[in-house]
Amino acid sequence: MATSGTTTFNLDFDDIITEAYERCGIEVRSGYDIRTAQRSLGLMFLDWANRGLNLWTIEQRSLSLVQGTPSYALPADTVNVLSAVIRTGSGSSQQDLVVDRISQNEYLHTPDKQTQSRPSQYYVQRTATPQLFVYPAPDNNTYTFRYYAVRRIQDFGAYTNTADVVFRFLPALVAGLAYYLSMKKVPDRMPMMKAIYDEEFARAAMEDRDTASVYLTPDFSI
């Protein structure tokens, strides 16, 4: 027997909402049903950002540093910065030098924040408008701050859009929305919907991880 030869199955938001309502035993009948589902999806995406890394939302970004300037605005969709380097030179002379992340207190206790040299440390202020602080302040305009950022999951938008999630998380997305809707529409189904959601999310989260090998070496000098 022949197979389709394609692996492009996906769901747009209209299909996701319809499937979630059907799991609750409800037929979508009004615009309000769509709007309340849209609101629940937005809240669920924010909850996913709090649950840990969503690998598909990690992006490599860059920021040109300015001589004598220790602070910089990060894009508004930045959730966190995972790691960073300072890039110097270009072409065959290009180098990426590791910079260490420090805490709020460590940066606050730095006595002279206007000291200029190649930056070796950075602090991320995780407020509504995230800020990056580097120390020392750059001593020229040739440095580039290259970093891996965790960004927010993109908003709902049009009903014909597909969700900003990888295919592995589609079952968890539908199950999660069904659970959120059950709180408002069919409370008696909440325990079942929550159990299904927790299982689907745990399964997807287990797969959504770096599979590089890790080697641990004991320190016998202690």
Image: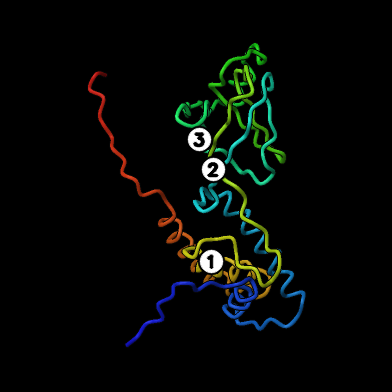
**Reading the chain from its start, which is encountered first: label 3 or label 1?**
3
Q: Which residue is mark 3?
A: 83
Residue at disc 2, secondary structure: strand
Q: Which residue is mark 1?
A: 194
Q: Residue at x 66, y 46 (%)?
A: 77
Is residue 124 shown above or below 5? Answer: above
Marks 3 and 2, how far apart at CA: 10 Å
Q: Which kind of residue does numbered mark 1 sit on? A: Lys
Q: Quadrant of residue 5?
A: bottom left
* Image-based side of 3 in relation to 115, left or right: left
Label 3 with label 1: CB-CB less than 8 Å: no
- CA gap between label 1 and label 2 equals 34 Å
Q: Residues within 10 Å of mark 1 (few under 14, many from 20)?
A: some
In the displayed image of the protein, which residue is found farthest to the left?
A: 220
Q: Nearer the viewer, residue 101 or 87?
A: 87
Residue bearing mark 2: 60
Residue at image position (52%, 30%) is 90
Mark 1 and mark 2 in contact? Answer it, CB < 8 Å. no
Q: Residue furthest bottom?
A: 1
Q: Nearer the viewer, mark 3 or mark 1?
A: 3
Q: Toward which corner of the image does residue 116 lie, by quadrant?
A: top right
Q: Which dot marks residue 186?
A: none
In the rendered image, the quadrant that contains the C terminus is: top left
Determine whether 74 is above or below 55 in the image: above
Question: Residue 30: x percent and y percent?
Answer: 76, 80
Decide: marks 3, 2 in contact (CB < 8 A)? no
Q: Amino acid at mark 2?
A: Gln
- Residue 17 in percent (x, y) is at 63, 74
